[in-house]
Image (cartoon, grey):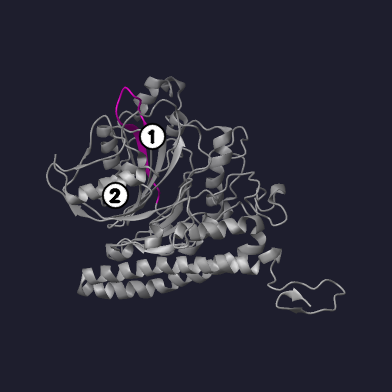
Amino acid sequence: MLRSQNALRVSTFLAFVVLGAPVHGQDDPMDECTNLIVTKGASATGSVSICYTCDAPFPSRLAWIPSGDHEPGALVSIPGLRAKGDVRQVAHTYAVLASNAIGHMNEHQLAIGETTFGGRRGLNDSVGLHYADLMTLALQRTKTAREAIKVIAALASEYGYTQSGESLSIGDKEEAWIMELIGNGKKKSGIVWVAVRVPDGHVSGHANQSRIGEFPLDDPANCMYSEDVIDFAVEQGFYDPASGKPFNFSDAYHPATDRTKKGCAMRVWSMLRRATPALDLSPDYHRGVEGAPRYPLSVKPEKKLTVSAIFALLRDHYENTPYDMTKCEGAGVYESPYIARTERAISIPGTAFSIVTQSRAALPDPIGGIVWYSPDDTFFACYTPLYCGTRAVPAGYTVGDRKKFNWDSAWWAINFVANYAYPRYSLMKSDIQKAQREMEGGFLLQQANVESQALALHDKSPDLSREFLTDYTVKSGDRVIKRWKALGEHLIVRYNDSRGRSSRRTRPAGAGGRRTGGKPR
């Protein structure tokens, strides 16, 4: 068996990251992931954006998988793929930005995110590919969302699928899709699936609950599905054609429960209501009111979303709603939404990393594709731009050991600030938001100039342009780590001995002495 150098490099990467990848069960998930999808026509920058919070209990480790040419017969070794051997390699693979086994964006601006919805028990195979394998392999092998959907289905069919139900957000430079899939049982190999295109000008989202209900059977421009997606449901007793009801994927493969409504649909409700306040989306469905309709798969936002507006949508604790986690009884004197969680918000402590991608057809691929990336809780995160044309990633984003603190690790630097602020949320959040505005705002202000320089270099030499983008990407990440380390030290000093907002102690009433050197005289 032949393996090219890059095939071995990929297998080594996957062997490492699968050990740290989220392993989701088949119960209804609550503490996992959230996705927001912004189509080209809904974006203020003309970008297709895939936004993904990976909520899992491990430090994030970013990686750049280089492109490669592979010999005939080369194989990719996939840990855990025990029954059918290694995956056949293709002649050429594309470079991919990834972390913890999960591919984010490739060099052609194709981006993928995911949330796990569990679904019917007993449908996953005991051997086969993990959803993270499918995502990374698809990014290495395809350029468009439609191609990725077909490759994911083909790989699962050939090699099996070992996880539970999954929703994938897949976006390229022109369009975005939601693909939902679940195994078709241990007697067969592969998945049943459906994929629906998000209408241009709309935003959509999913959060650990199947979102595709009824779908058209004769509209290939906007919907694709496996041939047996209905027949298998009938065979398993998940759907009865004699009922007279149209087939509904989510009802068949992931029937809603009160738990998924409150823990999962509620996050979708919050994203859609904030994007389109005039819709006045009712909370009835996520509160379990009988007969309340599901939330629409997508909505048209009242204003086109900027990148910073997308960041804000991911930093949500249901503020200014009856479910505001900063105002509930468990929040305490400092209004922390984390002290006693009464709801499942988008922003939670147990986030490994989150991304906001930009795929833009108006620019060459190395410049047009960006992954705005941050480890840890979105509310305390700092998004740094990673251009898909980069040939390296910041070193501090590739390391993180939960058992050993390290200021040089982006995950630890941001995690420290978040954890230090949790008990005194209302006191410290303004300091953190100021740092976010400084760093993220600076990156966004620099973006046009950086891309103008990269474009000028690209016209002369694409390699020089890539070197420029690599240097900018690495230095940007280094700056974030340095700034968040300084922020953490600032918080320690400013709020030492429970001082509150003031950096100086307040003299007791009637005290006549003056403080010198921090001690009473």
Instruction: Give the residue number, with chain letter if any, for mark 2.
Output: 139
Please say if the residues under marks 2 and 1 sit with CB atoms less than 8 Å apart.
no
Dot 2 amino acid type: Leu
Q: Residue at x 68, y 51 (%)?
A: 331
Q: Quadrant of residue 125?
A: top left
Mark 2 or 1 closer to N-term? 2
Q: Quadrant of residue 495?
A: bottom right
* Front position in the image: 61 or 206: 61
Can you give x and y, in whole percent of width and height, for residue 449 in the image? 37, 75
Residue 221: tell me if it is visible.
no
Q: Residue furthest left?
A: 72
* Front position in the image: 375 or 237: 375
In the picture, the quarter occupied by the C terminus is bottom right
Q: Which residues are magenta?
A: 182-199
* Front position in the image: 474 or 420: 420
Q: Residue at x 21, y 51 (%)?
A: 6
Relative height, residue 39 to residue 253 (above, below): below
Query: Is residue 185 inside the magenta stretch?
Result: yes
Can you give x and y, in whole percent of width and height, for residue 248 in the image? 44, 32
* Front position in the image: 137 or 196: 137
Element under disc 2: helix
Dot 1 amino acid type: Gln
- Circle 2 residues within 10 Å: few <14, some 14–19, many ≥20: many
Cα distance between the residues tagged 2 and 1: 19 Å
Q: Does 314 sit left or right of 322 as displayed?
A: left
Residue 287: tell me if it is visible.
yes
Instruction: Give the residue number, with chain letter if any, for mark 1.
Output: 163
